[in-house]
């Protein structure tokens, strides 16, 4: 199994830099199979959402569609897939960013009663408390 960095995943998905996009596509086609999927960790997913928002200006709906397709792709193995799906659904429905949704979900799964925050949007999520 290989791990995929955010920049490889972005090039594969966005196809905006022909030489790097070609290399990323070839790597994923060759190395990421159902039997031996490429590993995508939670940090990569958080960075992916951030890059698509900040660098590419994609709408939340477009980003949600991209993330959902990544989560459904059998050639990828997602770290803590259950928590990631829970966070994804919170992100889809609410105004908090994906990283906050994932952080709160992971913290709750590890027994945290609440996640303390100054972030007004995250503070509206279940399991968060404004400080």
Image: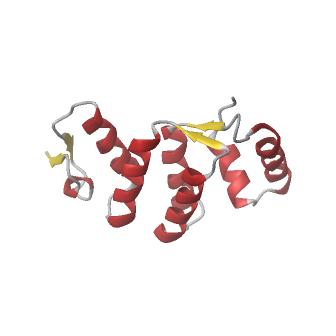
- Closer-to-camera residue (5/92): 92
Q: Is residue 59 above or below residue 53?
A: below
Instruction: Kindly identify the residue that appears in the image at 64 percent across and 47 percent down.
Output: 74
The number of numbered discs placed on residues in the rendered structure image is: 0
Left or right: 99 as drawn, with respect to 10: left
Q: Residue 96's x, y, as percent?
A: 32, 58
Instruction: Kindly identify the residue that appears in the image at 20 percent across and 33 percent down.
Output: 112
Left or right: 55 as drawn, with respect to 131: right
Q: Residue 82's x, y, as percent?
A: 41, 43
Q: Residue 105's x, y, as percent?
A: 31, 43
Question: The N terminus is located in which quarter?
Answer: top right
Residue sitting at the far front: 35
- Closer-to-camera residue (37/66): 37
Q: Residue 9's x, y, as percent?
A: 66, 47
Q: Quadrant of residue 44?
A: top right
Q: Quadrant of residue 2?
A: top right
Instruction: Kindly identify the residue that appears in the image at 79 percent across and 49 percent down.
Output: 25
């Amino acid at each position: 199994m290989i791990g995929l960095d955010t920049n490889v995943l972005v090039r594969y998905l966005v196809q905006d830099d022909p030489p790097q996009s070609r290399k990323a596509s070839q790597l994923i086609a060759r190395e990421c199979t159902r039997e031996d999927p490429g590993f995508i960790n939670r940090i990569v997913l958080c960075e992916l959402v951030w890059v698509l928002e900040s660098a590419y200006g994609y709408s939340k709906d477009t980003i949600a569609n991209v993330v959902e397709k990544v989560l459904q792709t059998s050639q990828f193995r997602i770290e803590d897939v259950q928590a990631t799906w829970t966070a994804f659904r919170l992100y889809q429905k609410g105004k908090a960013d994906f990283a906050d949704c994932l952080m709160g979900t992971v913290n709750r799964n590890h027994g945290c009663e609440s996640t303390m925050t100054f972030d007004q949007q995250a503070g509206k999520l279940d399991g968060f408390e404004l400080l």
